[in-house]
């Protein structure tokens, strides 16, 4: 039998923590590279696109963190 997701809230919390950490690293790297400008073109349209991508990733992070916090509350974890 193939599971559609984690079987327990604790397992879901572990997966969320991994997703959050990975997305935080990716978003931080994107913003770091944008700040250097050496690796990215300075074309305003491309910079705007990259900023939008970073903002979308941060919005996803906020959603994942809210879900994580709700799970922690259910599990009685700080």
Image (cartoon, rainbow, N blue to C red):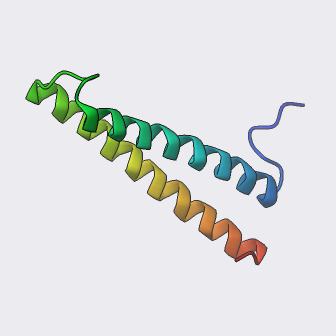
Residue displayed at 47% across by 37% down: 26
Where does the image place residue 25, in percent across and percent down from the top left?
51, 42
**Compared to 24, does 30 lie above or below?**
above
Q: Quadrant of residue 64?
A: bottom right
Residue displayed at 58% across by 41% down: 22
Where does the image place residue 33, in percent across and percent down from the top left?
33, 32
Of 71 and 52, the residue lying toward us: 52
* Image quarter (top left, top right, bottom left or bottom right) of the C terminus: bottom right
**Compared to 39, does 55 lie above or below?**
below
Q: Quadrant of residue 48?
A: top left
Residue at the far left in the pictured view: 44
Residue at the far right in the pictured view: 1
**Compared to 1, does 67 lie above or below?**
below
Where does the image place residue 66, in percent across and percent down from the top left?
53, 64
Classify residue 59 as left or right of residue 23.
left
Classify residue 53 as left or right of residue 75.
left
Residue displayed at 76% across by 78% down: 76
**Compared to 66, does 20 lie above or below?**
above
* Image quarter (top left, top right, bottom left or bottom right) of the N terminus: top right
């Amino acid at each position: 039998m193939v599971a559609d997701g984690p079987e327990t809230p604790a397992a879901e919390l572990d997966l969320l923590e991994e997703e959050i950490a990975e997305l935080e690293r990716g978003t931080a790297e994107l913003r770091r590279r944008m700040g250097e400008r050496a690796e990215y073109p300075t074309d305003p349209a491309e910079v705007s696109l990259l900023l939008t991508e970073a903002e979308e990733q941060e919005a996803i992070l906020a959603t994942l963190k809210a879900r994580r916090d709700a799970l922690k509350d259910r599990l009685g974890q700080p």
